[in-house]
Amino acid sequence: MKVMKFGGTSVGKPERMHQVAQLITKDGEPKIVVLSALSGTTNTLVSIGDALSKGDKAGAKQIVDQLEAHYKQFILDLLKKDDTRAKANQQISEHFEFLNIITKISFNDALNKDILAQGELMSTKLFSIYLEEQGIDHALLPALEFMSIDANDEPQLGSIRKKLMTILAQHSSKKLFITQGYICRNARGEVDNLKRGGSDYTASLVAAATNSTVCEIWTDIDGMHNNDPRVVNKTVPIEQLSFEEAAELAYFGAKILHPTCIWPAQQESVPVKLLNTMQPDAAGTTITKEAGSVGVKAIAAKDGIIAIKIKSSRMLLAYGFLRKIFEVFEKYRTPIDMITTSEVAVSVTIDSDVYLKEIVKELEPFGSVEVDRDQTIVSIVGNEIAETKDVLSRLFDSLKQVPVRMVSYGGSRHNVSLLIPSGSKQQTLQLLNSGLFGL
């Protein structure tokens, strides 16, 4: 079994869907194909929910109508036969009837999750109808029948495996399956989701649950690059990464891969390949247990970071002080990315301000608290770079002009992280690209 996931840009236009159909039928290997919503759809659905949360039902209705018009045109361009077009219009109309009903009733968070699920449900139905028109035998697997999360919003791989294998056994004559990424059911049985980028997570969970030979993530870029191609002038794709290296890069800002995607595949040693729908013959990036080489592989940057410094000459060295600091962040379920300490202060970084006011208020009894927004974490990732000769000297020689606020080194053998002002991000990435890669 092979798992192939296609993101929003890969299915965002009718001709791209046609191309995906060609890719998934190249060989006879059994496949589960995971699809995201059409590009732009999820953002539009978010806008509908935002309008309804503000009581703007007329505004929400207008957005729904615009989205429906887009899908009607998409169907005309995707399909050629009158009967399949009629079937597609009938199925998609049911989803827009649902959205129109929601614009007339009381809005709540559970309804918002239902709204957000419509994108993947529609994209998979349209793709299934196109495959049907092309005479390609397949089965549509509803993700809501097997993908679930517990009370802590964590997927339970064992439960997913059991449900999915039962469903697959009901289609023993099929070799091609289509399912939705992103969506799931929560512990209460309600429609929920795996958060932004969750289609990658779905694919990895499905690959692990079925012990697949590979989990292919198809996007619009030819693999993981050594730096951010949107910011840096010249970048190159990376041929091979270890699970640990890929996880570091994904967590610290590499947009091609969702941070949670690595864990399920790593648990079952399922290789992950990052491939380009627009250039299907490109080698892409393979992620396996083995790193393939040592030294610096890539640089990633994570924006929207908030630095918090707690300064207290009286309490810092006291027994249990750091534990009390961390308990505040644990209480508000806010992860810490970086931490540094000195004799009189401890600095940490977080990437969410949802509970920032509450956190600062509870930290103030420990000492003076300073908050700096608009920070960026730049991570230099590679196999055993902590033991690789000259990495640190080349790194800091490259950044003589950059005001580095924090440095994290030694916590991981594969990562050196720096905290810089976000305004220095582009300069930093360019300088490191030159100093570490000679590009």
Image (cartoon, rainbow, N blue to C red):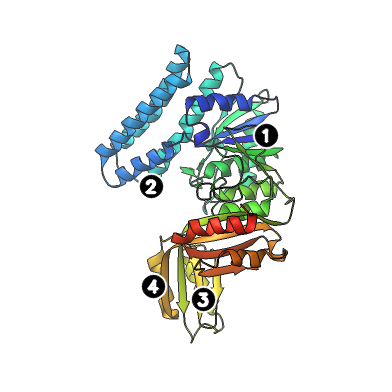
Q: Which residue is mark 1?
A: 2
How far is mark 4 from mark 2, CA to CA?
28 Å
Looking at the picture, how far across and down is residue 40, in whole percent?
42, 37
How far is mark 1 from mark 2, CA to CA?
35 Å
Q: Report whether 273 appears left or right of 338.
A: right
Q: Which residue is mark 2?
A: 109
Looking at the picture, how far across and down is residue 82, in whole percent?
44, 12
Q: Nearer the viewer, residue 393 or 242?
A: 393
> Which-is-in-front pick, marks 4 and 2?
4
Looking at the picture, how far across and down is residue 170, in whole percent?
64, 27
- The kind of residue on which mark 1 rests is Lys
Give SS at disc 2.
helix
Q: Which residue is mark 3?
A: 346
Measuring 50% from the left and 73% from the top, which residue is drawn there?
Answer: 347
How far is mark 3 from mark 4, CA to CA?
16 Å
Looking at the picture, does residue 240 appear above or below residue 356?
above
* Lower sequence index among marks 1 and 2: 1
> Which-is-in-front pick, marks 1 and 2?
1
Measuring 49% from the left and 56% from the top, which residue is drawn there?
Answer: 426
* Lower sequence index among marks 1 and 4: 1
